[in-house]
Image: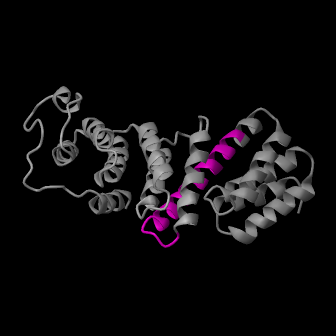
Amino acid sequence: MRKMIIKAAVLGISVTLLSGCSLLGGGGGGAGADTRYVARDVDTLYNAAKGRLDSGQYKIAAALFDEVERQHPYSPWARRAQQMSAFSYYLAGDYNKAIESSRRFLSIHPGNKDAPYAYYLIALSYYEQISDVTRDQKITEQALTTLGEVARRYPNSRYAADATLKMDLVNDHLAGKEMEIGRFYQRRGKWLAATIRFRTVIETYETTTHAPEALMRLTESYLALGIPIEAKKSAAVLGANYPGSKWYERAFDLVNKHGAT
C-alpha cells in the first residue's frame, strides 16, 4: 500500500522537462561527473537527476535535485526538485535528510497542493526507523505524532487512510513496549511498578492486541499485592471483553486459586 501511494505521488510531482533532452553523464558515469558544480540549464540538470532516480542511484539523484534548487532557485522546477530530493533521500534510506528536505519544502511552500505528500513523507521517514520494543521508543512516538498530523490536516487526502492504519500499528508497538517493561517488573517482584505499566496499556492502548494480556497481568499483580477485589475486577473486565481468550482462562484460574471469586 505504502509503495503504491508513494509511486502515485511521485508520478504526480515528477514531470520530465523536455522529453528530447539527454541525461547528463549518460551511461555508467560515476557520481562525480553528475554532482560536481557545473552551471547547467534547468532541463538538463533535472533530467539528469530523474535519470539517476529511475536507475536506482538514489543518493546521486538527491544531490542532483538539490543542485536544481541551488542553481535555479527561482525556476518553476525548484519546488518540484525539492520534493524529488526528499523522495530520493527516503529511497536511499537517509531518513534524516528526507525529513529535512520535506520540512524545508513546507517552510517555503506551506499551502502548496503537494504539502500533504511532504507531511506524509516525513511521517514515513520516522515510521521506517521504528526499533524493536527493547529499545528507546522516541522515534516511535515521533512517527505516531507525524502520522496523526497527516490524518488530522488532510483527512480527505490519499494518504489519510494509510496514515491511520500505520497509527494503529504504532500504537500496538508502543503498547508492546509497556508490556515488555511491565513483565520485566513482574519478574523482579516489583508488582506496583508492573501494575502502572499494565494500566497504561488498558487505559491508553485499549484497542491494541496487548489489552487482553495486560488485563491478565494486572490480575496477577493485584493478587501478588494482596488486593483480590481489584484482581477480580480486572478478571471480570477481561471476561466481558475477551471471554474466549487464553488470557481470560488464566485470569479466571488465578482468581479461583486465590479464593477471590
For residue 70: magenta?
no
Overall secondary structure of the magenta section = helix
Q: Residue lying furthest front in this view?
A: 74
Judging depth in this view, the residue of 15 and 40 nearest the camera is: 40
Confirm whether residue 42 shows in the render. Answer: yes
x and y percentages locating residue 146 in the rendered image: 56, 53
Q: Quadrant of the C terminus?
A: bottom right
Judging depth in this view, the residue of 56 and 185 nearest the camera is: 56
In the image, is residue 103 above or below residue 151? above
Q: Quadrant of the N terminus?
A: bottom left
x and y percentages locating residue 223 in the rendered image: 86, 49
Judging depth in this view, the residue of 175 and 52 nearest the camera is: 52
Q: Is residue 251 left or right of residue 161?
A: right
Confirm whether residue 128 shows in the render. Answer: no
For residue 160: magenta?
yes
- How many numbered marks appear? 0
x and y percentages locating residue 243 in the rendered image: 69, 69
Residue shown at the point (58%, 59%) measured from the top left:
148
Q: Quadrant of residue 101?
A: top left
Q: Is residue 232 left or right of residue 34?
A: right
Residue shown at the point (46%, 63%) measured from the top left:
162
Q: Quadrant of residue 2?
A: bottom left
Q: Which portion, as a residue range, is magenta?
A: 155-181
Q: Is residue 147 left or right of residue 77?
A: right
Q: Is residue 54 left or right of residue 130?
A: left
x and y percentages locating residue 35 in the rendered image: 23, 31
Judging depth in this view, the residue of 137 and 150 nearest the camera is: 150
